[in-house]
Amino acid sequence: MALNYFQPLFDVIRDKDRCIKCQACARQCSNEVHRYDADLDMMISDSQQCVDCQRCVCICPTGALKIVDNPNKFRNNSNWSQQIMTEVYKQAETGGVLLSAMGNPKEYPVYWDKILLNASQVTNPPIDPLREPMETKVFLGKKPKNVSFNEDGSVKTETTPTLELSTPIMFSAMSYGSISRNAHESLARAATELGIFYNTGEGGLHKDFYQYGPNTIVQVASGRFGVFKDYLETGAAIEIKMGQGAKPGIGGHLPGAKILEDVSRTRMIPMGTDAISPAPHHDIYSIEDLRQLVLSLKEATEYKKPVIVKIAAVHNVAAIASGIARSGADIIAIDGYRGGTGAAPTRIRDNVGIPIELALASVDQRLRDEGIRNEVSVVVAGSIRSSSDVVKAIALGADACYIGTAALLALGCHLCRSCQTGKCNWGIATQRPDLVKRLNPNIGYQRLVNLVHAWDHEIKEMMGGMGINSVEALKGNRLMLRGIGLNEKELEILGIQHAGQ
Ligand code: SF4
Ligand code: SF4
């Protein structure tokens, strides 16, 4: 028997007094951790396969199960951590690139947690959102620089196409293939009910979801999967994906095992073949090339739809955003290094890119300095975890936020970070029919609606506390922010003062 160099990450603990041997855990675990041993008349667990998705814990009718971190540790070493050692063993065994899912989990600073909001006291009194009007509606797209007039003296009200959102939140790009049909249906129905938008990601649009077109952003990525005329015409906006926060600088890879019949039809690729999107768009090597694609997509849709360009937050993001604003795009989406993914090389996910907070602040400032801030809206993504993150992002200069992981959490995701295996026990990041049906879209969509309603209410409360009655008035209002525990350089980039100043 080959020697096993590493220990399981988790320990499955079963309280034998509570366990009634109903085998619900065995039926629910797609990783085949639990089994009933008839000879011993007891349930047995193989902790090695456990990914800590908590499905069995939630399902067990008697609360007999607990998943804990494996207390068995290699000898303490501040340099060679348990994780680093385990990864070396794994690569020595497989010779392969390490893959991970969801966002960067490392202990880099979370700047949202180092920024505090203001509240009115005595002067400029707070506004009570329960009694006074509070506007969370936003419009994404180009804004006129000045008020201009028609020949008859009336004010010109025509603008280039915009997206109207009831609240400054949208669901991030997540492709059909990387997530299940039921997850997509939940997102599409929730976006429609909420008056916001969900995003197809690079997987095309399933024909059953064309009905949600007015609340759909259709994506054009480097692989151009599922892109054709009807697709472009069905969406309310078109997003060109140049990069993604979880894996800047590289393409995408959906394993052939996930390309089942429906996914293959939607992506317009053969069943069972790997869907590999290249790192660059092979027709884009400059802002001029990008401009050609922006204008081609506008031409193809009769200039009726705003075009979004999505990039990862990287070192010179402000200069890149300035170029994009001049490319004719209407909206720039910036995805920070904490952004989620269905699968990414671990080293890329954990080491490439920059925090969305710093990227947003420098992009907004650069566009203002260059006098082109009204040319584009800025949408940020990459770990927007709560309504207070949204409020801070708006005050730092964003027009709206994309949420991905938070939306999946609302659907039941427990952040086990094993999406790349295709065995999601919560029916989200899987195409296995027995697992997909665990996510009921009737419940999923309602939970998403609840989440966004709750955030919308909290956004109003926070704005009211600051004496601000509209998202538009909060946008870029950095006086409402103070840093805590940040150094001079960080405060300078964020463009905010320290608490106490
Ligand atoms: S993988 Fe999930 S369902 Fe299976 S034993 Fe671990 S926590 Fe339970
Ligand atoms: S979507 Fe599923 S597999 Fe992915 S992190 Fe969430 S629970 Fe785990």
Image (cartoon, helix red, strand yellow):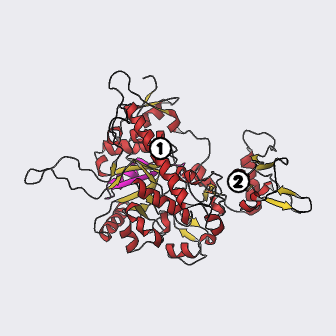
Task: Report which residue position mark 1 lands on.
Answer: 454
Q: Which mark is residue 202?
A: none
| Quadrant placement of the N terminus | bottom right
Q: Residue at x 29, y 53 (%)?
A: 142
In x, y percent, where is residue 324? Answer: 36, 55
Q: Which residue is drawn at 46% across and 73% down?
A: 207
Question: Which type of secondary structure does the marked residue at label 1 adopt?
Answer: helix
Q: Which amino acid does label 2 sit on?
A: Ile
Q: Would the CB of label 2 be found within 8 Å of ligand 1?
A: yes
* Lower sequence index among marks 2 and 1: 2
Q: Locate residue 172 relative to residue 88 in the image: left or right.
A: left
Q: Is residue 57 above or below residue 265?
A: above
Examine the structure image and report whether residue 212 is included in the region drawn in magenta.
no
Q: In this view, does 447 lie above or below 458?
A: below
In the image, 249 versus 300, the foreground residue is: 300
Task: Report which residue position mark 2 lands on.
Answer: 59
In x, y percent, where is residue 233? Answer: 35, 69
Magenta-colored span: 315-341
Whether tag 2 and tag 1 are in contact, CB under 8 A, the answer is no
Extreme-right residue of the structure: 39
How far apart, in angstroms, are the residues tagged by discs 2 and 1?
Answer: 27 Å
Question: Which type of secondary structure does the marked residue at label 2 adopt?
Answer: helix
Examine the structure image and report whether residue 316 is included in the region drawn in magenta.
yes
In the image, 277 versus 456, the foreground residue is: 456
Q: Is residue 453 above or below residue 37?
A: above
